Amino acid sequence: MCPPSSNGTTSVYLQTTGNGHVQAIRSQKDRDKYPDRINLDRRGLSHIPHIVNESKLRLLSAQHNLVTSLDNFSTNGSASFSKLVFLDLYDNQIEVISGLDALGNLRVLLLGKNRIKNIEGLKCVPRLEVLDLHGNQISVINNLGALADLKVLNLAGNQIR
């Protein structure tokens, strides 16, 4: 078990399960104190850990990690993410936007400073209001038609033609 990350909001322990998955665990005290948020910033994570017993989770931050894929959101147990409205994955190594099917209530998606080349995989988050894709490798603006509620789109620092 890794020591907790304490960032002023909550302490999160990372534990490897018997089948090799990494699980994020909080004490009941921390869950009661901050039931709606988990911070996994700067933990050296290569994927989003399994998050269980977090049915009130609304905000998840995993900035400054080594996350390469969003696929764990669809396999992680959708109950943990059914109320998620804010997802911050700034400064990771994500190349493709996919696996967001369980995040139907998502309003804010921060994916700045990743390795994303195409805007895709967003049809399953139609309530998205803020999409930050600055500092990626995007060259064409497309696939935004399903985002009728989109109010803020940041594409600064890309290779738009």
Image (cartoon, grey):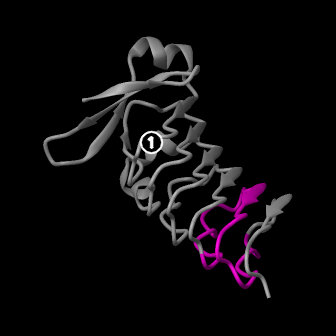
Total tally of numbered discs in the picture: 1
At 77% across and 82% down in the image, what residue appears?
160
Question: 157 or 75, which lies in front?
Answer: 157
Q: Quadrant of residue 69?
A: bottom left
At 61% across and 52% down in the image, what residue appears?
90
What x and y, as percent, mark residue 17? 19, 40
In the rendered image, the vertical position of residue 9 relative to residue 98, given as above or below: above
Label 1 packing within 10 angstroms: few (<14), some (14-19), many (20+): some
In the rendered image, the vertical position of residue 140 relative to residue 21, given as above or below: below
Q: Quadrant of residue 33?
A: top right
Q: Which residue is mark 1?
A: 79
Q: Main secondary structure of the magenta part?
A: loop
* Magenta segment includes 145: yes
What x and y, as percent, mark residue 62? 52, 44
Question: 9 or 7, which lies in front?
Answer: 7
What x and y, as percent, mark residue 124? 60, 65
Question: 148 or 59, which lies in front?
Answer: 59
What x and y, as percent, mark residue 16? 22, 39
At 54% across and 23% down in the image, what residue appears?
35
At 39% across and 53% down in the image, what residue appears?
47
The quarter of the image holding the N terminus is: top left
Indicate left or right for 24 with 37 as reference.
left
User: Which residue is at the far left?
Assistant: 18
* Magenta segment includes 78: no
User: Which residue is at the far bottom?
Assistant: 161
Range covered by the magenta-colored residues: 117-146
User: Which residue is at the far right?
Assistant: 151
In the rendered image, the vertical position of residue 12 relative to residue 114, given as above or below: above
The quarter of the image holding the C terminus is: bottom right
Circle 1 sits in a helix, a strand or a loop, which is it? helix
- Amino acid type at circle 1 is Ala
Indicate left or right for 84 with 2 as reference.
right
